[in-house]
Amino acid sequence: MAHALAHLAHSDVLTRAAAYARDYRRGNHPISPSASSAALRERFCLPLTDDGLPGARVIDELIAAAEPGLVGNTSPNFYAWVMGASDPVGVAADWLTSAWGQNAAIYQSSPAAATAEEAVEAWLLELLDLPRESSVGFVGGATMAAFVGLAAARGEVLRRGGYDIDAEGLQGAPKVHIFLSDDAHVTNYAALRQLGFGEANFHKLPSDDAGLLCPDDLAVAMGRVQGPKIVVAQAGHINSGGFEPLAEIAALARLHDAWMHVDGAFGLWARASTTRKHLAMGAELADSWSVDGHKWLQLPYESGFAIVRNKIAHQRAMQKSAGYLNAAEEDGRNPSAFTPGLSRRAQGFAAWAVLRRLGRNGVAALVDRHCDAASRLARRISRVGGLEVLNRMDLNQIVVGCHSLSNECWKITALAERLNAGRCVFVRTALWKGRTVLRLSVISQDSEARHVETLAELIEGIWPKIETEAENMGGWCQTNSNPSSLIGLHM
C-alpha cells in the first residue's frame, strides 16, 4: 500500500511539473524578472524543515518562488546574450534523461548514454565538417570545452619539446607561450588559468575594431620566442561576431609546431550553413575546437562539445582509471575518457533528439534565419538618426553605439532600460572598446524577421525622445549614468 501511494505521489509531481512547463513554453510569462533580490531570498532562503514536505507542495512552492526571478531567454524577443532557447524536443529528451537517471561515466554504467554520444559525435563532425578522426567530449559548456581542448594542447606541446607532464607534473616544465587576442573571450583566459597558466604565459596581441588579432602581429610575436606554443583563435567574436583569418593562423601554427585551438562557441556553427561556411574556412586545420550546444543548437543547458583532432592526446589529458571502472573488450565508447569528470548527466540523449529533429538542413536553416534577421535589424537601426551599427554584419551579432560619443553611455543605457521597461523585449548593454554599447544577439530558436521588426520599431519610437532629453539636459547627463528615473515619463 505504501509503495502504491508513493507511486501516485511521484506521478502527481511529474504531472504538475509537465503541465506548468507546457504553459510556460507557450510564452505566457513575463520576459523580464519582476522580483527584487530581497523578495527572491524571502521565497527561497527558508529554514530547512525537520521532516520535509509533500512533493506536490514543494513543486508548487518552487514555481511560485522562481517565476518572478526568471529571465525569458526562451522568448523569440530575447536579445541580451548569446544563449539559445532550449528546443522543446531537447527539453523533452532532457526530461527523459532525468527520469532515466543514467550516469554517463563509463559504457557499462549506461550503454545507451554512451552509444547516443557516439552517434552525436559522428553527426557533429559531419555538420561542422571537421576531421572525422577527431574525438568529442560532452561537457557543460564552452568554458569546459576550452579547458579540455587546451589541456590536450598543454600536454602535447610539452611532449613535443621532450617533457612528459604526466610523469613530471607542471612544476619545472618548460614555459609554454600562449598567443591570443587581447579581446579573446574571457572563458579562454579562465580555462588557461585553471590549467596553471598565468600572465607570464600570455602573449596578448592587439585587436582590431572587431576584437580580432592580425596574423602579421602573430607572426612577429611567435618569431620572438622559442619553446612550446599554443595559439587560440576566434570563430565568432562574442561582441562583433567576427572571425579571425583561421587559415593564415593555422599556417603560422604549423610553421612553429604550435597547437591551434579555435574558440567557436557559437560561430563555428556557421560551418553548418552553405551560405556562411566561408566565414569559418580554415577552422578545419586547427587541433581542437570548443563549441556550445545550448547556443545555436538550442540544447538545454549543460551542453558543450570539446573536439580534439588527436584522440590519443585528448584521452591522455583526461585519463582516469580505477579497479571499479569496469571495462570489457566488447564495450562501446567510454564517455569519461574524453571529459574531466566521471559521474555526470547523460548529455547525449538531448543532443541526439535535437539533431534527429533538425537534420543537416534544419541546422543550416536555423543559422541562416537568425543571421538574415540580424542583418535586417541592423539595416533598420542604421537608418535611425544618431545611432550607428559598429560591427560588420557577418553573423548574428549587432553592436550599436551613437554617432556622437557625447553622452553615449547615458543615451545607450537609457535606450536599453526603456526597451526592457515595456516588457516586450529583453536587451542588455555591454562595455566594449571603452564604450557603452547596445549588444544584440539574434539566436533564440523562434526569432525571425517579424520579431526583429518589432524591436526596430520600438527603437525608432524611443530613440528620438532620448536624443531630445540629452539635448535639454546638456552636460548634466554626461555624469548621470542612471536614466531609470526617467523611464516612466517617456514610455
Image (cartoon, rainbow, N blue to C red):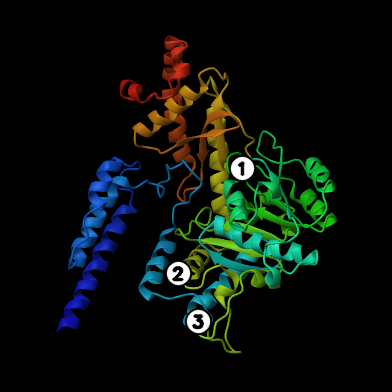
- Residue 237 x/y as whole percent: 62, 44
Name the residue that disc number 3 marks. Answer: 111
Q: Is residue 363 above or below residue 32?
A: below
- Mark 2 nearby-residue class (10 Å; few <14, some 14–19, many ≥20): many
For marks 3 and 1, the one nearer the N-term is 3
- Residue 391 x/y as whole percent: 62, 34
Name the residue that disc number 2 marks. Answer: 345
- Mark 3 nearby-residue class (10 Å; few <14, some 14–19, many ≥20): some
The front one of 279 and 53 is: 53
Question: Is the residue under label 2 in contact with that under label 3 (CB below 8 Å)?
Answer: no
Name the residue that disc number 1 marks. Answer: 241
The front one of 174 and 202 is: 174
Residue lying at the far bottom of the rendered structure: 329
Q: Secondary structure at mark 3?
A: helix
Asked if residue 350 lies left or right of residue 433, the reply is: left
Question: Is the residue under label 2 in contact with that under label 1 (CB below 8 Å)?
Answer: no
Asked if residue 160 lies left or right of residue 356, the reply is: right
Quadrant location of the C terminus in the rendered image: top left
Q: Secondary structure at mark 2?
A: loop
The answer to which quarter of the image holds residue 165 is bottom right
The Cα atoms of the two marked residues, 3 and 2, are separated by 13 Å
For marks 3 and 2, the one nearer the N-term is 3
Residue 133 is at least partly visible in this image: no
Circle 1: residue type: Gly
Circle 3: residue type: Pro
